[in-house]
Image (spheres, grey):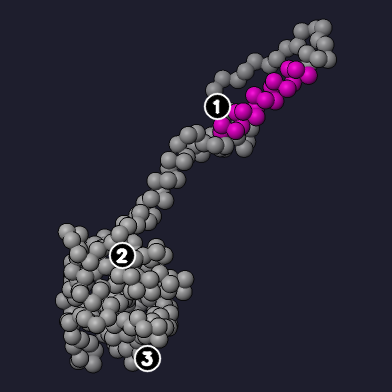
Amino acid sequence: MIDARRRALTGTRSGPRRPPVTLQAPVTLHAAVTTFRSAAALLGLLSLVACSGGAEAPTQTEGRSAAVKPAKRTGAVNDTGGFCELAHPASGAEARGFAWPVEQALPDGSTPSAKLATDRWTYVNVWATWCRPCVEEFGLLARWDAALQKEGRPIDLQMLSIDKVEDKDALARRLATGLPGHARWLRSEEDFGPFLDALGVDRTAAIPIHALVDPQGHLRCVRVGAISPQDYAAVKSILAGG
């Protein structure tokens, strides 16, 4: 396909050269014009085929789009805005419970509770001090938390750090400046893989990761990647419709 486009732009073609056209005398004006138009039409057709790259281009484009973001599973959660990359129902064979990974005490020595809220949804944010997109969305998460509280849809915002033990000082400094939610700390890197498995996410997934857990403890929605202000309506819809 690339070679075809290159040939179309440079005006060169592969294969044997066509012998030059020899006009036999006498040639009438009408015959000359007809010959010229035929040659021009042929060149235009060849250029069109070369630029299109053949019939395989649409198939490749559709396949690439499908690989970037899987089709949303309908009926699992009230995700009208396409926020969730993975969605699970609240009951049935495909329902998936949520449990915290193995954790360690925070730098100040405190240990968060493993119990999930039963009177509201739990919003899980997976982050790290060295993850710039994670830190940059803290302000947005804080505004979402306040707005949902005001609209009667409070959440329990839990912030799970995956910083390593050697990053304890950096984590302590970040916690001292404040987080938009309750801090948690993964025990070790070895515990992260099984946690991603439980979320249904590939072990090579990047952070931030967002997960929504309903009051019954079911994992309902998972999103990999940063959020934007435009996602608020979709999140509110999920919390309202379940």
Amino acid type of the residue that numbered disc 1 sits on in the rendered structure: Ser
Q: CA distance from mark 2 to mark 1?
A: 55 Å
Amino acid type of the residue that numbered disc 2 sits on in the rendered structure: Val
Q: Give the residue displayed 35% in from the left and 90% down from the top.
A: 178
Relative to 203, is 171 above or below?
below
Per the rendered image, the range of residues in magenta is 33-50
Amino acid type of the residue that numbered disc 3 sits on in the rendered structure: Thr
Q: CA distance from mark 3 to mark 2?
A: 35 Å
Callout 2 secondary element: loop
Q: CA distance from mark 3 to mark 1?
A: 66 Å
Residue 236 sits in which quadrant? bottom left
User: How many residues crowd around disc 3 within 10 Å: few (fewer than 14), some, or many (20 or more)?
Assistant: few
Camera-side residue of 229 and 103:
229
Q: Residue 43 at x, y = what percent?
A: 65, 27
Q: Give the residue displayed 40% in from the left and 69% down from the top.
A: 234
User: Which is closer to the viewer, label 3 or label 2?
Assistant: 2
| Residue tagged 2 | 77
Q: Quadrant where the C terminus lies?
A: bottom left
Does residue 80 appear left or right of residue 124 in this picture?
A: right
Relative to 111, is 203 above or below?
above
**Residue 43 is one of the magenta-drawn residues:** yes
| Residue tagged 3 | 177
Q: Residue 109 at x, y = what percent?
A: 20, 92
Callout 3 secondary element: helix
Q: Earlier in the sequence, mark 3 or mark 2?
A: 2
